[in-house]
Image (cartoon, grey):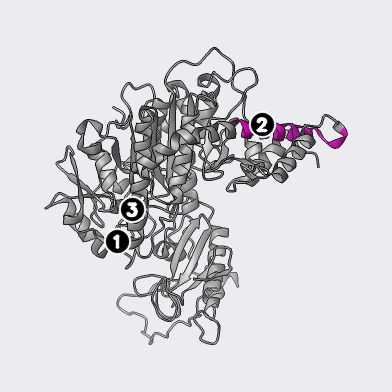
Amino acid sequence: MLWLVLLPAEKPSLLNPPPVTPSQPAPTTPPKPTAAENLLSGYGDPATPPIEDLKKLHHVIGGYFSVIKESSKNPIGGNADLAAALRGENPNRTVFLPANHRIFSADGLLLDRWGSPVIVHPEGWRQLELRSAGPDKVAYSGDDLILSPTGLQKNP
Amino acid sequence: MMRSRRQFLGEASCAAIGSTSILSTLLNLTMANHAAAAGGFSGQRKALVCLFLSGGCDTFNILIPRDSPGGYDEYAASRSNLAIPRNQLLPLNYTDSQGRQYGLNPACTRLAEMFNGLGGDTSKKRLSFLANVGTLIEPIPNKQSYLDGNIALPKALFSHRDQIEQWQTSVPQGMPVLSGWGGRAADVIHSTLNTEQTAGYYMPMNFSLSGNNAFQIGRSEGQFVITTGGALSFTGTGGTSAMQQAKEQALKDVVASPIEEHYQSLFQRTHGRITANSIERGALFQQSFDGSGANLNAVFAAAGFPNHWLSQQFQAAIKTIYIREQLKLARQTIFIEFGGWDHHSELLNTQRGMLLTLDAVLYAYQKSLEALGLADDVITFTASDFGRTLRSNGQGTDHAWSGNQFVFGGPVQGGAVKGSFPSLAIDGPDDIGRGGRIFPKLAADQYICELLRWFGVSNGDMDQVLPNIRNFYDPASAANPVGFLG
């Protein structure tokens, strides 16, 4: 078998080019989802309580901070920073979520199930409070959903 | 597992940070070096009072450029629905070297008076602002150098807890063992300047009215947590009922008992002795604190303090300064925290209400210090977690970095805006992104260093207190790092 590999490839002649065969689409395999994508499975599913969305995101954040140890680069001060960090703008250049993930808005913000940007409130390094504006889409109103950095639901 | 004495005290102390527990106070006291008896005191008595506006105060809606066209237009465009109308700004009688003029939030009428001159007297300018100040490890020459990522940055920028810690420690890299710049200042000056404390007398120089904090923890010196009623005690604040007194006496007897069988270890014996000492310190403090009341109540009433808990805090601060001779203290720091500035929503109305309170309290406080002849001995300064984004999120603003602070008192050369006021244009030369995050051009270290030079920390000791200072300023320099004290 080795000789087959070592045989010089036949050089195509410019005058007699090899016959062109219709190109066949290369078999594609869907990219393997990242761990963060798996954690977000079912995000926004109407069959699940809305707070579950924030819990899923909280798990993703936990994974992020278990991998990213550097605390002085790519600081996270809100939604835009966190979203960018999850897309790969972090000290390790690790992509946690692909840019085309459905959790992101067109301008790259993390969205809740009602389409409002999730409010990301950094209390400390690795300590992010998450808030959804809720079904009325008005932030800081009575129907907001809040998850503390410890993962417990809080009252608005 | 056996623990060393250092471990025991260290762990216990760390566990108490963030609470007002009496135990933590006692343990902080235990770590204190007793002041050396090296001659008598002579010289000016001084106090530094830290007002920490926790939550991240939106100070770009307090100190506002009012020159137009120019500064105000830039401000108004960036702040959109959060902008204070130009005709409502309280004018400050000051023009900087760039020709820029400033105004204050309309809720700050008395702060404007303290800036422009108390009672209209321009010889009594008591307050100055520091523009564009924040936590830094090294200077940031320009926006591009930040974006290039080659500048050492404070850890976990834009997060509350980390930035509070960094303002109070002045070590933005983070610290394996927490100590604050007020505590480290006490380490180097308590025994050398508070020389009236002789013959076993000991009173700490760092007082907190807002529980334990990082600011006042030193390597050897600690903080003494007090309340508006005076010293904390095991039975509450200043308890005088027969039951409380009996309880306290029983406690004293137990901890002072010489019978070693009561204790299983040297640590427990040490702790017992310290507890007894601390009860004595508390009693000593309380005696003087209570005795000052009659003299001061009339002054407080005349000064017009509003009915607010913050007034009680500042009145207690004045009392603590007023009794400094009885406490044998030539130097004191006092820590007061005023929280609730995290205005992600309803910035305008909520901040206005808080500023009205702050404005009235600080004015009455300064007025009281003036009436008592203490004004030249006290500098009060503000700090806050961080500044906020210029762009409105609809109702408020989000976490950012640099902001403006103010400093006041008799020694302050008032009536100026020090530092370099930034461009407030979104995506402008001073905005590092995400809707108007201004990077600091003045380091918290420079601000603090100037306060400490006045307070008595020698140039030679400055590195111990501010490990990063030489990145910004040579402590041996004749000129002050910022210039608000001349």
The answer to whether residue B316 is magenta is no
Q: Earlier in the sequence, mark 3 or mark 2?
A: 2
Residues under numbered marks 3 and 2 in contact, where contact means CB atoms less than 8 Å apart: no
Residue A121: % across, % down:
46, 62
User: Residue drawn at (17%, 37%), measured in percent from left and top?
Assistant: B97
Residue B296: % across, % down:
44, 35
Q: Earlier in the sequence, mark 1 or mark 3?
A: 3
Q: Are marks 1 and 3 on the same chain?
A: yes
Q: Nearer the viewer, mark 1 or mark 3?
A: 3
Q: Please tell me in which quadrant of the rendered image residue A24 appears.
A: bottom left
Q: Nearer the viewer, mark 1 or mark 2?
A: 2
Q: In this rendered view, identify the residue nearer to me: B471 or A49.
A: A49
User: Residue drawn at (37%, 26%), measured in percent from left and top?
Assistant: B474
Q: Can you identify the residue that label 2 sits on?
A: B280
Subunit ID for the residue under disc 3: B
Q: Can you identify the residue that label 1 sits on?
A: B391
Residue B320: % across, % down:
50, 34
Report the Cα–Cα distance between label 3 and label 2.
Answer: 40 Å
A66 shown above or below B333: below
Q: Earlier in the sequence, mark 1 or mark 2?
A: 2
User: Residue drawn at (48%, 26%), measured in percent from left and top?
Assistant: B331
B308 shown above or below B276: below
Report the Cα–Cα distance between label 1 and label 2.
Answer: 53 Å
Q: Secondary structure at mark 1?
A: loop
Q: Secondary structure at mark 3?
A: helix
- Magenta span covers which residues? B261-284
Q: In terms of secondary structure, what is the magenta stretch mainly?
A: helix
B210 shown above or below A6: above
Labelled disc at residue B356: 3
The answer to whether residue B270 is magenta is yes
